[in-house]
Amino acid sequence: MSSARNMRKSVLSIAMGVCLSSLAMSPAYAQSATGGVAGRANAGDTITLVNSATGASRAVTVAADGTYRLSQLPIGDYSLQVKRSGQDIGQSVAVNVSLGGTTTVNLGNEGNLTNLDAVQVVGSRVVNRVDVYSTETATNINREELARMPVDQSVGAVALLAPGVVASGATFGGLTFGGSSVAENAVYINGLNVTDPYRRQGFSSVPFAFYQEFQVKTGGYSAEFGRSTGGVINAVTRSGGNEFHAGAELTFEPAAWASEKKDHFHRDGTLDERDRTSRDASPLYKTNVWASGPIVKDKLFFFAMYEKRDNDSRDIDTTKAFYTRRNNDFWGGKLDWHINDDHLLELLAFSDKSEAATDIYKYTWSAGSKDRLMGDSISESGGDNWSLTYTGHFSDSFTAKAMYGVNKRSAANSSTQDPDCSIVTRSGSYTGKFGAETTVEGCHPTDSSVNSRNDKREAARLDFEWTLGDHLLRFGMDREIMDSASTTRYPNDGVSYQVQAATAGAALNGAIIPAGTTAIVYARRYLTGTPVTTEAQAFYVEDNWNVTPNLLLNIGLRADKFHNKYSAGVTFAKADFSDMISPRLGFSWDMRGDGTMKLFGNAGRYYLPLTNKLADYFAGTTDERSYYVLDGWTELQHPVGGTYLLPILGAQIGPVNTSNNVDPPEDFRTAVARDLKMVFQDEFILGFQRAINSTWSYGVNATYRRMTRAVEDVRINHVEGCPWYSGDWPIMNPGETTTLWCPTTNDWVTFDSSKDGYKATGSGDISGYKKPRRTYKAVEFQLDRAWDDKWSFNASYLWSKSEGNIEGPVNSDTGYADTNLVQYYDHPAVNERYGVLFNDSRHQIKLRGSYKLNDIWSFGATLSARSGGPITAFGVVWPNDNRAAGGSGEFDGGGSGWLCEQSPSNDCSNWATRKLTYSERGAFGRMPWVTDLSASVTWTLPVEGVDLKARFSVYNLLNSQTVVNVHSRYESTPGTKMPYFGEGTVWQSPRYMNLVVTYNF
């Protein structure tokens, strides 16, 4: 008896918890909110799983080869029992099923565990160490693990725990996975795609406490997954069970607990153009209440949550103060109806609607006084969302799943001053030359366009699993209809005005800046927007074949199609199934046969379809740019804003530039290439994992990604055999053979766009566009010590290299976020350079851990450190061409690798004689390392039966405010250097703290 007790004590002291890292390779349930259990046992025995929370049970007979598998299980804790001839064999084993994972449980003749080195067991709960049924790379983490560490309450903060995931330093933010851009990811909640369909940036979200578990996928997705060449965040929400539970969570994050953001100044002492930040504050207070339990015991369960948020903030600049009031309370719930043990119906519903109203005041920085009200700004976001999922187990070998859901998003910005006031701004060059603003310039309180957009996704999918001997066949289909209705315009007269410093005699807009001119006005008229729809469909088939008991092959094929069109039914672009074929092949070798050591690999192709933004833009856009001499300022009065200055437009410099206008085409044959092909990425991964013992494990994997296609608007001003193309911007695959309609000949014309398509002004040289290319190479090392009710630790190091001549469908270098509509192909010079890209962080180190001192006190910490990105210079011209290859403003688009140094012997304004210097990508060094250390301490009330905890967390403990992006525009016009090249534009957020108090019963 003593020996048995000691053995049991030894087993129960082994660590529980997932190897919460990319060591925990999850199987191929890309959009699933479920997991599985599989392993070996005696042939003919029955394996029965009973859900500990709901009482639902599943059973399967062990096959003749001694293997069994139960899939499509709701995540959570289960009791596993072996039965032989109707009688229980041995003691039941408590098994944990993780999101998208397959827990391996090998059982001996007496029903006892035989793979103790490959699993952790605490409180008898079995959790995987090495998932030999998976060929992909993913990081799983649940809410219990997150509660032990200082992880901020956002989905993005969870994703950043995974190796290879980086917060982008782009001015528009976002996450990058494996060197991809921020517009290539997808996010799912309970299998519902909640990714922004308009730009593929951002996503709908729910409160942190609403989630149960996260899975961050960084590569090797199965064939059921597509429409992403970056990463995937797959999350599942909490559910109810047979016991009634409820709780409350209070979050305190007062402004006094945050370090001030530094005011940033240029090297010449002038204030950064983003203005002051040291007096900004964004306190946060949240009250979250929830309840769960049975409506009908063993049958119908509920989980419901409401969150009240107080997130009023202030943004204090030199002359303006912005005070914001937010109404963004959340409600959400989930119903689970276990019709019987074989059939489950789940309903998820939540609303993340939000509205913010900002009062804008005149402010005197030196006195610290908030003066008169200037106006307001109103923003709206979010929407109502729901999904209904049915899972049916029709036999031991056949399972079917069906899901239908609706995801809504909105994005609107406006002001009550829109009818009265135009946008008036100033460039950094103007401030540098003439000093800071003293009297308010313009009466518009926000200097932003009026935007309104409503997105709606209707998603439906069917998935099937069929076990046939050594084969697990998986097949299915999905369909998404994504609607977007948007409008964007400038307020008042529809024109925005920016004053800029200028040099008399310099070339601008095809003309010469007049003598005596020291400043100009850049005027832009912009209006776009129309309802658009994308219908996307896909089907897939996949075979998980156990070639031997220790070798699994994953063979899959996916085919996608889509149709972008307008509300009237007119087609913008489409692709058929034959155009988007994605083969997938993976393997997993259980090297020892006991689940402790695994060699795995996979290869696959992944397609990225078009966004609604692209069709929206080409439905018709007025985008006219004009330049004027600045003839001083006139003083005016506004009934709300009071006194303000308006620039006086002098002589116009050059004509109105209408090259960016897009007329609503009646015939899209000249706007979209006939043979348009979709962007794809090929990916190859090879990895190794080993569980050293019941708590320690390590792994290493290598990844190679390659993208060789782009879909962009391309300047085409020459096509041999078709004089009509003298200046158009069709959507096509640059660098490839392209077929467009030629109105001149009334026929199709095919040309090689790597050799033709662009004619230089002045010299008349004919050239094409370089084929896009992006590669990502990475090697990842990881060491993990799983939680054993005392401490845990995870360390990873990632070496990577991201190179190419295109970042992806957005451009972080110059701050352009319009997916597929950036400036890479506005001019052949923009993408001729191949080298390190914006998202190239060569070294990444991530550490995290937690320690339990006693039943009262526990501690957690995270550390991330990554090397800075490259600093690349962007010029505005290239050799033998009198046309600009980039705009004159910092974020005005485009840019070449050719720079001009003005001197008495080098007249940069003369295209024919000027001498240019070529600059490689990253030629100006790198930004500094970005380090973030965070720590937390948790207090637990030491009273049995009372679950009261308080966690105090400090984020960015060292208060690092490192620069993560810089000015990249080297010159505004040939030979005219930008004053702040290489200086910061985006910085790391400062230290802040919060207290989270939870009470559950």
Image (cartoon, rainbow, N blue to C red):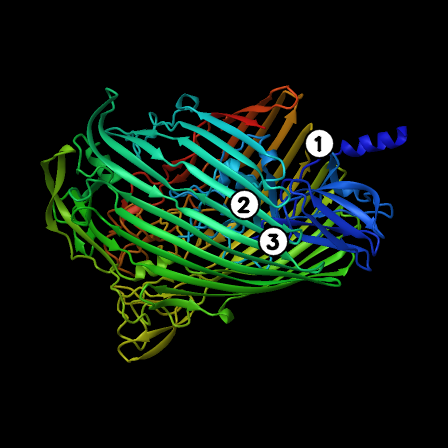
Identify the residue under disc 3: 29
In this rendering, is residue 494 above or below 604?
above
Total numbered badges shown on the rendered structure: 3
In percent of width and height, residue 79 lies at 73, 42
Quote the CA–CA distance across marks 1 and 2: 33 Å
Q: Which mark is residue 335?
A: 2
The amino acid beneath tag 3 is Tyr
Q: Which mark is residue 788?
A: 1
The amino acid beneath tag 1 is Asp
- Image quadrant holding the N terminus, namely top right
Q: Nearer the viewer, mark 3 or mark 2?
A: 2
Q: Nearer the viewer, residue 724 or 109?
A: 109
Quote the CA–CA distance across marks 3 and 2: 22 Å
SS assignment at label 1: loop
Q: Nearer the viewer, residue 545 or 712?
A: 545
Q: Is residue 821 visible?
A: no
In this rendering, is residue 116 above or below 607?
above
Q: Is residue 153 left or right of residue 821?
A: right
In percent of width and height, residue 4 lies at 87, 32
Q: Is residue 435 left or right of residue 864?
A: left
Asked if the residue at tag 2 contacts the one at tag 1, i.e. Cβ–Cβ closer than 8 Å, the answer is no
Q: Using a 10 Å C-alpha cutoff, classify the residue at mark 3 as few (fewer than 14 neighbours), some (14 to 19) or many (20 or more).
A: many
In this rendering, is residue 784 above or below 248?
below
Question: Mark 1 or 2 closer to N-term?
Answer: 2
Q: Is residue 313 visible?
A: yes
The amino acid beneath tag 2 is Leu
- Image quadrant holding the C terminus, namely top right
Q: Using a 10 Å C-alpha cutoff, classify the residue at mark 2 as few (fewer than 14 neighbours), some (14 to 19) or many (20 or more).
A: many
SS assignment at label 3: loop
The residue shown at (82%, 44%) is 114
